[in-house]
Image (cartoon, rainbow, N blue to C red):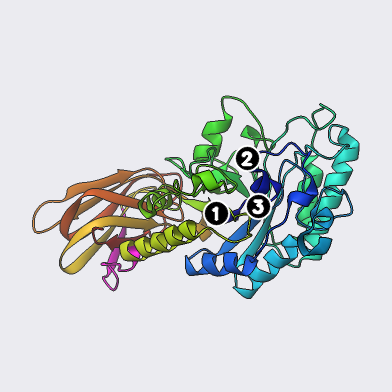
Amino acid sequence: MFLHFGVNTFTDREWGDGREDPGIFAPTALDPHEWAKTARAAGFRALVLTAKHHDGFCLWPTKTTTHSVARSPWRNGRGDVVREFVDACKAEGLGAGLYLSPWDRNHPSYGDSPRYNDIYAEQLTELLTRYGTLNEVWFDGANGEGPNAKRQVYDWPRTFALVRKLQPHAVVFSDAGPDVRWCGNENGTAGEPNWSTVNPARVLVPGATGPDVAPALQRGDADGTVWRPAEADTSIRPGWFHHPAEDARVKTADRLFDVYCRSVGRNSKLLLNVPPTREGRLHPTDVTRLMAFRDLRQAAFGEDLARGARLIWERTGTHTARAEVELPRPIAAGAVRLEEEIEDGQAVARYVVQGAADGDWKEISRGTTIGYAKIDRLAVPVTVRRIRVVIEEAVAPVEPVRLEIYPPR
């Protein structure tokens, strides 16, 4: 779960300009424990907080700027949102991640590349050393003008190396990884195909542009040399920060379920933004939709109809294979989930799922990559007694593929 929270929450804007009075940051009931408890109840496993967005306002008391919570009336200027957030995550057994915007529309050094790179490294060091273990550090390539109308040249090698040094087990996200890559859009849709391997030369830095960038982010590379799986992000609302005018425009549970199947169901991780309100709590409508989203997932994927059935795996060629399951009785299938053993890499490039009741095999779905998870929702429920996955093409010898069958929704 992503949490966009900061001065934009109080100015009702998406992008601040860095000229905000820190005094406007005044949540009346800030409760990160509510964020974390809601996330855990809804089935999320980690949260990422916007420690600093493009406006430069820092949610922790930093030594690098006066544009921070230390100059706000909240907690009498002695508060630390990042501390409360990380503590809440730990209390609920969730991973804690932080986003530190490289673009800073407030800091006077932005655009003076060496000087600002030092400031940015100092901010990152504070975040990586004050709060214990972090499981993800999130970057993007946002690069507009600063208060001096200059653009900044970022030092990404230094930034990534600093995370490696201070939080060696944290996953680093950006367009260019190095660990997890952006999927190339903000609607939560992973590509088809979607390889977890990439050619790192195609996207060298966060914010890179060019005709090859979007396909590389969306689909990865079948012959890639680096393991860099996709993370798909989107917001539960039209915007990323909370705006009261959007309270009636929250995504429905059905829409969220569709996003899940287009992200997690296409070999990606899902990062869903749920922005806190000015009070510092999640909006009741958002919470209600999250719980309904959880219920839909549990109803759709709670009963594997193939559980306990024997899977017969047969190699039919160097890079082809077949997996077959025979069920004790005919069942109505509404969705199929396939999984590769990604500890051994990702191999499947094209497959077809076939089903049979008492007669001949009939195609019920077809796809390209599988990876960690591929969910095929059937347009029309199919009655089957036997079901098989035929691997038609792979980039390496295929290991056994896990097959799960779920009833119609």
Crowding near the residue tagged with mark 1, few <14, some 14–19, many ≥20 C-alpha atoms within 10 Å: many
Which of the numbered marks, if any, corresponds to residue 274? Answer: 1
Q: Label 1 sits on what residue type?
A: Val
Residue 378 coordinates in the image, percent (x, y): 25, 50
- Residue denoted by label 2: 14
Name the residue at 53% across, 40% down.
Answer: 186
Determine the residue positioned at 37% across, 61% down: 297
The C terminus lies in which quarter of the figure? bottom left
| Residue 220 spot, x, y in % from top left | 53, 40
Magenta-span inclusion, residue 309:
yes
Asked whether residue 256 appears in the rendered view, the answer is yes
Amino acid type, mark 3: Phe
In terms of secondary structure, where does tag 1 sit?
loop
- Range drawn in magenta: 301-315
54 displayed left or right of 352: right
345 relative position to 403: left or right: right
Query: As shown in the figure, which amino acid type bears the numbered disc 2?
Result: Glu
Q: Which residue is mark 3?
A: 5
Please indicate, yes or no, whether residue 226 appears anywhere in the rendered image: no
Q: Is residue 276 above or below residue 131?
A: above
Where residue 166 appears, as percent x and y from the top left, is 80, 59
At a point 34% along the width and 63% down the height, the residue shown is 301
Task: Assign a secondary structure to mark 2.
Answer: loop
